Each structure stands twice: as C-alpha cells, then as structure tokens.
Amino acid sequence: MQRRSTMLPIAAVLLAGSAALYWTHYLIFRDAHHIFIYLLGDVAFVPIEVLLVVVVIERMLEERDKRAMLHKLNMVIGAFFSEIGTRLLGDLTPAVQGKEQVWEYLALKAGWRRGDFQNAIAFARAFSYQMDPQRIDLEALCQLLVTKREFMLRLLENPNLLEHERFTDLLWAMFHLAEELSARESLRDLSDNDLAHLAEDMRRAYSRLAAAWVAYAQHLQASYPFLFSLMVRTHPLQEHPSAAIA
C-alpha cells in the first residue's frame, strides 16, 4: 500500500512533465499534426517495449535468479552429503537385496555423461529396493541419525528448500526412520512385522537418498570437477573406495 501511494505522485509528475513538453513543442512550432504523428508512433511501440521488458528481460532475470537459488540449494545438499548423506548411503546399501544391481547402475564413473546420470536417477527412483534390516547394524544406524538430527533440522530451516521438494522429502524420510528406530526399546530380536515395517522405512529413505546423491554428483561434475573427482574415488558404491590416485 505504501509503495502504491509513493508511485502515484511520481506518475503524476511524469505525466505532467510529458504534457508540458508537448505543449512547449506546440507553442514553438504550431504543428499539432507532427506532434500526433510521433505521439501515435510512441504509443504503438509501447506493446513492443512491454514484450521486451516484461517477457524477455524479466524471464532472463528469473532464470538468473533460479540458477543462483539452485546453486545455493546445491551448497546445502553438499553439506548434507558431506556431513551424513554419503555415510548413510554406505551404511544402508548392504541391506539392499541385490545390491550388485545398485552398484551396476549407481556406481559413479569419471566419464559419465548426461545420459548416464539421467539413467541412474531414473533407476534410483524406480528400483524396488527390497531391504533386509538384519543385514546392517540398526543400533549404529539409529545412533548416527539421532546424532545428526539437529544438523538436519537446521537444513530444514533454510527457506530455499521450499523450492526443492525432493530433497525435503528425503530429509523427512530420514527423520521418520530415526524416529522409528529410536522409539523401540531394543533393536535386537525384532518381530517379523517390525522388521517388515523398518524395511519399508529404509526403502523409502534409501530411494530418495540414492536419487539425490546422483543428482548432486551431476552438479559437481558440471560445476566443480575437482570435487567430482574425489567423489568418484571415495563413494561407497564400489569395492575399494580410496582417495589415493592409482
């Protein structure tokens, strides 16, 4: 409201200035025909100006702002994977039944191209991920998630995450898995129903985690190849991850 009240006097001053200039032109040259020719030409050009300013330039500015926002989002996602995400990927993968297929499709390679990343992301989102919780240390997984809960909560406080629903869903899936694990008095000798329920929670979290991890790797390859090189050498979906260059 205050902005509108400020713009009205400015608009009035500009219109009055334009009218004064046209009147001055008429007083000097006494040529109303000439004035109306140029006035009509200027008015006819207004839609083109609107097209250039509102549609083209504004769209370019929106795209620039979107790229800047995605860059900030990838910084947040990078912090997540550095702090907990990559470790979770390594800790949860042994629970996947048929993890060899996961390694086949998701194990990053230095020479991957756009199509390889897109295929890996599609596989990560579509793979059934039958999980067996008994294959991993549930107590260690629970401890890790509980320890990093405050960190993940701080990530959710970032307003930019509202533009990234998939990553937000990943964080909520991790929170839920942490709550399920920590709510049980013991994670040993669980019933078959308990194990089946935890397997579904793990599947939900793992599918989102794997897809987000591949998408982040694609961003690193395009923007930070030196970080991508380290990621290729150290990621947990390979036999012998090592930062050392052979």
Image (cartoon, helix red, strand yellow):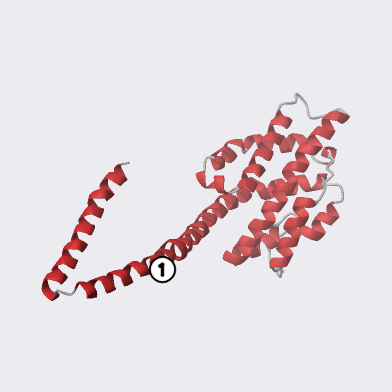
Secondary structure at numbered mark 1? helix
Residue flagged by tag 1: what amino acid is it? Ile
- 51 or 213, which is in the foreground? 51
Task: Count the numbered circles shown.
Answer: 1
Compared with residue 148, is residue 60 higher up or lower down, i.e. above or below? Answer: below
In this rendering, would 39 be left or right of 108?
left
In this rendering, would 29 be left or right of 102?
left
- Does residue 224 appear in the picture of this structure? no
Give the crowd class for mark 1: few <14, some 14-19, many >=20 residues within 10 Å: few
Compared with residue 67, is residue 207 higher up or lower down, i.e. above or below? Answer: above
Residue 187 x/y as whole percent? 79, 29
Residue furthest left as drawn: 28
Quarter the N terminus occupies: top left
Residue 32 x/y as whole percent? 20, 72
Residue furthest top as drawn: 185
Residue drawn at (23%, 74%), measured in percent from left and top?
Answer: 33
In this rendering, would 183 be left or right of 168?
right
Residue tagged 1: 48
Image quadrant in which you'd find residue 230: bottom right
- 102 or 22, which is in the foreground? 22
Quarter the C terminus occupies: bottom right
Residue 76 x/y as whole percent? 56, 50
Residue 228 x/y as whole percent? 64, 63
Residue drawn at (56%, 48%), measured in percent from left and top?
Answer: 163
